[in-house]
Amino acid sequence: MFQGMEYVYEVYLEKSFSKAAEKLFISQPSLSANVKRVEHHIGYPIFDRSTKPLSLTECGVQYIKAVEKIKSIQNEFEGFVNDWGDLKKGALTLGGSNLFSSWILPPLIADFARRYPLIQISLVEETTANLARMLRHGQLDLMLDSSVLDAAIYGCRKFQEEHLILAVPGAFPINNRLRSYQLPVEDILSKRFLKESCPPVPLTRFKSEPFIMLKPENDTGKRARMICQNNLFEPNIILEMDQQMTSYNITCSGMGISFIGDIMLSKVPLTSDVVYYKLPAGESSRDIRFYWKNGRYQTRAMEEFLKMACQ
């Protein structure tokens, strides 16, 4: 019914078939034929051809009102697409555990917001299991995590490589016997501890010490237990926590040993009350990744955020 409406609307504006034909760069007979085709499809005339200048019939008045609504919607959508393409509109919802939502994502969000101030950004802090569920159900656009999620469900992009480090309360006497293995904070921050010239600590020396572990479903908790198993001992676990940051704070209080990522140590205030050791290679290294749901349309905001964060 509205196919060919641009011809009708131009005649309405010019109040003349001849003037409208000139504006549209078509012949007057062709324009008349197009308008009659629209009128035939409607079943009623749009123009009263007996008047000069040309006027609208009662049906024509309503048709023009409808055309103007359609043109307004088209213009609004075109404006949205143009703004959206330039990231002047849109939304982005990110998710992370306590560590990532507190220390890693905020500076990335601030940088993105400076570049694209009109994008509405939301940050969700939850456990990995809840974040993965929210991502699967479309409640998140992206999540940042150290876990390995099902590749059949989730796509991913590497953010950074992380290395677990052993954090030991400084008051523990065992530190006096392992001074040659202790890592200066500067070596952790500069990544110098990753060089082969820096030896890992003999982990079995800690088998009788108390450990603060993350729960088995947490990737850090899984890796920590596997590292201990590979070094032929079962850790003496006195507390199990949900968050890496919490376990580190307990270590800082002097209660027990924890496994901490070097990314976190590069972000949080470090203390002289904790001694750090390099762990054996293998399970102590992992990738931190951004995840999204496979098959979901990636918005421009998602694309640009990933490009900025993972460059």
Image: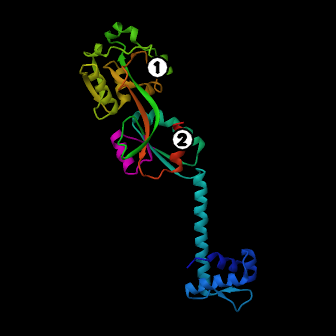
CA–CA distance between discs 1 and 2? 27 Å
**Residue 254: x %, y % from top left:** 33, 18
Q: Answer with the quarter of the image where residue 130 lies.
A: top left
What label sits on residue 188 in the rendered view?
Answer: 1
Identify residue type, mark 1. Ile
**Residue 210: x %, y % from top left:** 27, 19
Label 2, on which residue?
Answer: 307
- Mark closer to the chain start, 1 or 2: 1
Quarter of the rendering occupied by the C terminus: top right
**Residue 166: x %, y % from top left:** 36, 20
Q: State the residue lying farthest toward the bottom.
A: 50
Q: Answer with the quarter of the image where residue 19 lies.
A: bottom right
Judged left or right of residue 44, residue 285 is: left
Identify residue type, mark 2. Lys
The range drawn in magenta is 123-143
Q: Answer with the quarter of the image where residue 244 lies.
A: top left
User: Which residue occupies 35% across, 32% down?
Assistant: 243
Label 2 SS:
helix
